[in-house]
């Protein structure tokens, strides 16, 4: 079975399912939504064999992006149940925000099949999510999951696992002259990520919890390394943050 047939089948199937995908009614009311994928502009021949997995996600990207709340107290919250259980899909749950990585990927991916690279509506929603993520952080660097002040290991550790990759994508895009985000917000996000990493390495309750649930603790190493190795995260003298 050829890659082109697989991509075409997946894209058409996903497109047909969009009507029952649970898109928020509010999405249609939000200003400048991310437009649906125009299948006439995307050919299966544009995808390499290893990229077939992105076809389904490409079709559904607008559903996720347009679920980002763009006004009010919870601006930046991703108000759709795709990552957490419905009862846990609450504004205080930082794990819901981890889909910023999906938005960042399509915002920066320089591929012929990706019409959303640098799209201003997608940038606006990505920036809103990053702003909400920064605002959701406790002063000591931790994030919450199951309650408004349930500052804990999992949302902090897995949050860095995802945020390290988002920052890597944004920095790589900037270095090649690709799409960027607001510089001040970018720096705030870097600072918030640094605080979370410091908390993961020093906060007694996070370390103690990690001794019982090692996956929740070690999950952040990949994101932390992606963050630490980026040139943007050096000080003006070229030294890495420590």
Image: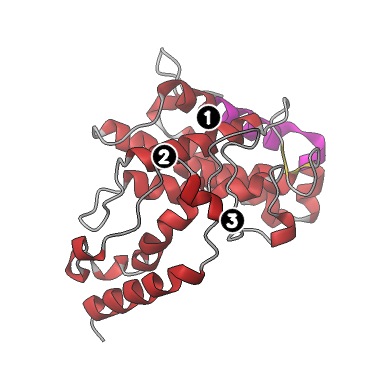
Counting residues from the start of the chain, the first of labels 2 and 1 encountered is: 2
Looking at the rendered image, the disc whose residue lies closer to the viewer, 2 or 1, is 1
Contact (CB < 8 A) between labels 3 and 2?
Answer: no
Tell me where the magenta segment starts and ends, as one range: 191-206
The residue beneath circle 2 is: 168
Closer to the chain start, of discs 3 and 2, is 3
Q: Position of residue 190 (x, y in %)?
A: 51, 28
> Counting other residues with Cα less than 10 Å from the Cα at mark 3, is it few (<14), some (14-19), or many (20 or more)?
many
In the rendered image, the vertical position of residue 187 relative to residue 98, given as above or below: above
Asked if residue 178 lies left or right of residue 72, the reply is left
Q: Is disc 1 surrounded by few (<14), some (14 to 19) or many (20+) residues within 10 Å? A: many
Which residue: 27% across, 54% down? Answer: 114
x, y percentage for residue 241? 52, 23
Kindly identify the residue that appears in the image at 72 percent across and 42 percent down.
92
* Cα separation between marks 2 and 1: 12 Å
Look at discs 3 and 1 and give the one toward the viewer. 3
| Quarter of the figure with residue 170 | top left
Q: What residue does disc 3 label?
A: 80
- Mark 2 lies on a secondary structure that is helix
């Amino acid at each position: 079975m050829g890659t082109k047939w697989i991509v075409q089948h997946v894209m058409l199937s996903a497109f047909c399912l969009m009507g029952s995908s649970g898109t928020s009614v509010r999405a249609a009311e939000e200003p400048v939504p991310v437009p649906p994928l125009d299948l006439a502009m995307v050919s299966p021949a544009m995808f390499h064999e290893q990229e077939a997995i992105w076809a389904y996600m490409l079709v559904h990207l607008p559903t996720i992006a347009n679920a980002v709340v763009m006004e009010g107290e919870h601006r930046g919250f991703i108000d759709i149940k795709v990552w957490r259980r419905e009862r846990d899909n609450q504004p205080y749950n930082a794990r819901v925000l981890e889909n910023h990585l999906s938005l960042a990927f399509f915002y920066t991916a320089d591929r012929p099949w990706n019409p959303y690279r640098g799209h201003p509506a997608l940038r606006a929603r990505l920036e809103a999510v990053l702003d909400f993520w920064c605002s959701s952080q406790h002063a000591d660097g931790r994030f919450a999951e199951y309650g408004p002040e349930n500052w804990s290991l999992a949302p902090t550790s897995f949050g860095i696992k995802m945020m390290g990759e988002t920052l890597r994508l944004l920095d790589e895009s900037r270095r090649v002259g690709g799409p960027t985000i607001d510089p001040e917000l970018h720096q705030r996000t870097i600072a918030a990520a640094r605080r979370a990493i410091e908390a993961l390495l020093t906060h007694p309750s996070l370390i103690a919890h990690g001794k019982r649930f090692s996956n929740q603790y070690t999950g952040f190493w990949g994101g932390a390394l992606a963050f630490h190795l980026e040139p943007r995260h050096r000080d003006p003298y070229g030294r890495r943050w420590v």
